[in-house]
Amino acid sequence: MLKISPLFSGSKGNCTLIRSDRVNLLLDIGFTYRSVVEALAERGLEPSDIDAIVITHEHADHIAALPMWTRRTDTPVYAPQGIVDLIAQRAYSSEVTGIADDFRIGDVTVSRYECCHDSVCCFGYKFICGDSRFACVTDTGRVDGALADFLRDCNAVMLESNHDEAMLINGEYAYPLKRRILSPRGHLSNAQTAEVLRRLAHSSVRTVILAHLSEKNNMEELAFKAAVEACADCGLVEGRDIVIYVANQYENGFDVCLD
């Protein structure tokens, strides 16, 4: 069994709670320490209940609370091997373990996917517990067969749907930043995410969480509409054949339970 609870998701910070029968994991810890603690308390958990933190990459919106968290707890931290030293500099008292291959935390097996992003190293992850499989891939700018193959055997996926291209191009960001976001080492657009969903239409995926939306260059309605239409193109009806959620930057009142 896996239970997925997006706590915070967006350009300002990202943190997802993943629970099995034996362990409680945080995927990234990129919001304020106080906000993460309060979000956990709403779910009946304290910082001492977290068995491990798994980091995707070193950008602040994924590790902002790590210094305070590790100052107050001894939670083990896992991070891509290529950024272990960078993460260790931010983790005051915790052990930081480098990720190179599949590994286990309690009853959960974790495998990695190498994202294409303008960071030193960035991984997406698949969490496997019994027959339950959940993958999260954000902060990548490229859609290819390898991404679809990584996600294909999952029951549920959390996938970046960062921006609407028209909003970004016509928006207030400086040209170099726009170019960075639109590049293969940037972030997935709604249209790119829709393409991933088309590739997954006849896979095991039956729940999709759209994540890491830009507050200035996207809207939840646009991301949801693009995903629903992509599924409809393949004969899937949202709410019947597939369920699509949109994760919010500040508060998310839904959990995804995989038996």
Image (spheres, rainbow, N blue to C red):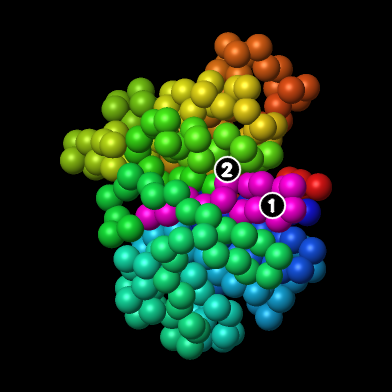
| Residue 244, x across and y down, in percent | 66, 31
| Magenta highlight on residue 183 | no
Q: Amino acid at mark 2?
A: Met
Q: Amino acid at mark 1?
A: Ile
Labels 1 and 2 touching (C-beta < 8 A): yes
| Magenta highlight on residue 132 | yes
| Residue 249, x across and y down, in percent | 55, 49
Viewer can see residue 41? no
Q: Looking at the picture, does residue 212 appear above or below residue 192?
A: below
- Tell me the residue at 27%/50% (across/down): 118
Check disc 1: other Cα within 10 Å, few if <14, some if 14-19, many if 20+. many
Q: Looking at the picture, does residue 16 appear above or below residue 186?
A: below
The magenta segment is: 122-135
- Tell me the residue at 26%/36% (across/down): 183
**What secondary structure is the magenta-colored segment mainly?**
strand
Q: Looking at the picture, does residue 215 appear above or below residue 68?
A: above
| Residue 96, x across and y down, in percent | 45, 78
Q: Looking at the picture, does residue 251 appear above or below residue 59?
A: above
- Nearest the viewer among 242 and 60 is 242
Q: What secondary structure is found at the residue carrying circle 1?
A: strand
Q: Which residue is mark 2?
A: 158
- Tell me the residue at 59%/72% (across/down): 52
